Every structure is written in structure tokens, then in C-alpha cells.
Image (tube, rainbow, N blue to C red):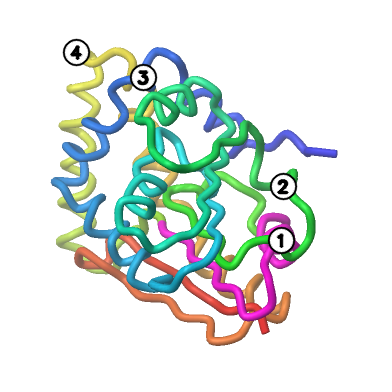
């Protein structure tokens, strides 16, 4: 049974039919184009043929990149917000889509070679998601999670704070993103997803747990292998 927690509520509050159509342009603009670079790093980690599950696939940006890169034999995207999946479906890419939650995966055991995700970790019960990923991953399968991180450098912290002040003002013009622009900073600042993910992966038995930071510590990618 799915436990309704604050992260689930944030997802429902942040993402809806009102902003689904503008997500791709917003994520590109607000990350200064770095989103595609971070996603390319994910692809570089899993550069072998196989089957991939893209958790919180949203509008299908990462799933599309995987199929365009001709890396995967099969890609399945899963997302909680149905309206975002509708956008992904319109892109006409060669991947399947599922409406669901990463905390209770509707797939049989050991059916994917890779489980990947971008921007999911700060919203979920990480231990539960790691357990589910372990269950659906094949032996020697790879898990990769990417999300925003709060930089350790004080100058960068000040920059990020000032940037979100600007985004808050933009929220009065782009009303469908107002809540996100107002609340995402606090979520990023207080999230401990990197430490929680690393600990959960190691406790579950994953090997070769690796964490790399990008863009001056404003994003991180964690990967590991199921033995």
C-alpha cells in the first residue's frame, strides 16, 4: 500500500495539466541548458544495449534521448502525472509508457538491465524506491539517479538564492509554474537525497556505488550495480 507523504504531495502540487505542455522549455531555460548535459551523463553510464526503466519520465525527454541514441533495445517510462505522459506519447518515440509510482513498481522481478531517473529522488521514500529497483533489476543491472543538489560553496549558495528570487518574480507572469518557482528552492536546500541514496544502495547490497557532482555542485548523479 502506498503511503501518502510530503514528497507525493509536492509532485501533485508542482506538476499538472496546466504546465505539462511547457515543461520541456521551462526545464531547459531554468537550468541554462544544463539539463540535456546531465542526461547525457546518465546515458554515458549505461552505454550498453539492454532494457531500461525511466522512473519519473515526465514528458519523455530522457527516454527520447535513449531511443534516439540507439542504446536501448527496450525503454519503458513511468510517471505519476498522466498529463505528462500524454505529452511524451505525442512525441512518437519508440518507448512504452506507464502511469504509476516509483515506490510500487508494476513490473515483475528481474526484468530490466537499467533503472534510471532524473529529478525524482527529492520527492520519494528513497529506501522504498531502492528496494523496488533492486527487485526489478537483473543481476549486474545498473541503477542511476540524478537530481539537484545544494552547493557547498557560499558564493554559489548566494547565487542560487538570488536566482530563485528571480524565478519567484517570474512565477507571477508564468502562473502555471508559480508554486514550483516559490517552493523548489527550499526543497533543494533541505533535501538530503544524496546521503540517503548512497546509504540505501549500500545497505540493500548494491556494489560500485558512485556519486559525482556536476555544475559546481548544483546537481549530482549516483550510480550502482546490482551483483
- Quadrant occupied by the C terminus: bottom right
- Give the residue drawn at x 59%, y 39%: 7
User: Residue 173, which numbered label?
Assistant: 4
Q: Are marks 3 and 1 in contact (CB under 8 Å)?
A: no
Left/right of residue 136 with respect to residue 51 in the rendered view: right
Pick whichever of labels 3 and 1 is earlier in the sequence.
3
Look at the picture and state if 185 lies above or below 177: below
SS assignment at label 2: loop
**Residue 209 screen position, x and y as percent:** 53, 81
Judged by depth in the image, the label closer to the viewer, 3 or 1, is 1
Pick whichever of labels 2 and 1 is earlier in the sequence.
2
- Report which residue position mark 3 lands on: 19
Mark 2 residue crowding within 10 angstroms, few (<14) / some (14–19) / many (20+):
some
Q: Which residues are magenta?
A: 128-146
- Report which residue position mark 2 lands on: 105
Q: Is residue 226 magenta?
A: no
- Report which residue position mark 1 lands on: 136
Pick whichever of labels 3 and 2 is earlier in the sequence.
3
Q: Is residue 130 magenta?
A: yes
Mark 1 residue crowding within 10 angstroms, few (<14) / some (14–19) / many (20+):
many
Of 97 and 38, nearer the camera is: 97
Look at the picture and state if 189 lies above or below 206: above
Distance Cα–Cα, label 3 vs label 2: 25 Å
Distance Cα–Cα, label 4 vs label 3: 13 Å
Judged by depth in the image, the label closer to the viewer, 3 or 2, is 2
Which image quarter: residue 20?
top left
Pick whichever of labels 4 and 2 is earlier in the sequence.
2
Distance Cα–Cα, label 4 vs label 1: 43 Å
SS assignment at label 4: loop
Amino acid at each position: 500500500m502506498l503511503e501518502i507523504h510530503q514528497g507525493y504531495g509536492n509532485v501533485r502540487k508542482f506538476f499538472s495539466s496546466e504546465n505539462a505542455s511547457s515543461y520541456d522549455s521551462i526545464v531547459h531555460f531554468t537550468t541554462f541548458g544544463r539539463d540535456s548535459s546531465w542526461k547525457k551523463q546518465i546515458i554515458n553510464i549505461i552505454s550498453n544495449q539492454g532494457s531500461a526503466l525511466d522512473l519519473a519520465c515526465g514528458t519523455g525527454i530522457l527516454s527520447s534521448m535513449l531511443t534516439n541514441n540507439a542504446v536501448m533495445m527496450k525503454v519503458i517510462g513511468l510517471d505519476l502525472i498522466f498529463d505528462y505522459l500524454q505529452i511524451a506519447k505525442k512525441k512518437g518515440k519508440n518507448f512504452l509508457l506507464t502511469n504509476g509510482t516509483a515506490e510500487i513498481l508494476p513490473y515483475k522481478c528481474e526484468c530490466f538491465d537499467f533503472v534510471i531517473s532524473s529529478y525524482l529522488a527529492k520527492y520519494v521514500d528513497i529506501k522504498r524506491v531502492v528496494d523496488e529497483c533492486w527487485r526489478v533489476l537483473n543481476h549486474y543491472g545498473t541503477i542511476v539517479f540524478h537530481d539537484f543538489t545544494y552547493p557547498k560553496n557560499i558564493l554559489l549558495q548566494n547565487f542560487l538564492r538570488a536566482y530563485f528570487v528571480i524565478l519567484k518574480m517570474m512565477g507571477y507572469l508564468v502562473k502555471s509554474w508559480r508554486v514550483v518557482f516559490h517552493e523548489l528552492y527550499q526543497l533543494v536546500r533541505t533535501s538530503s537525497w544524496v546521503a540517503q541514496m548512497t546509504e540505501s544502495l549500500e545497505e540493500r547490497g548494491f556494489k560500485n556505488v558512485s556519486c559525482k557532482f556536476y555544475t559546481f555542485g548544483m546537481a549530482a548523479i549516483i550510480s550502482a550495480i546490482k551483483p
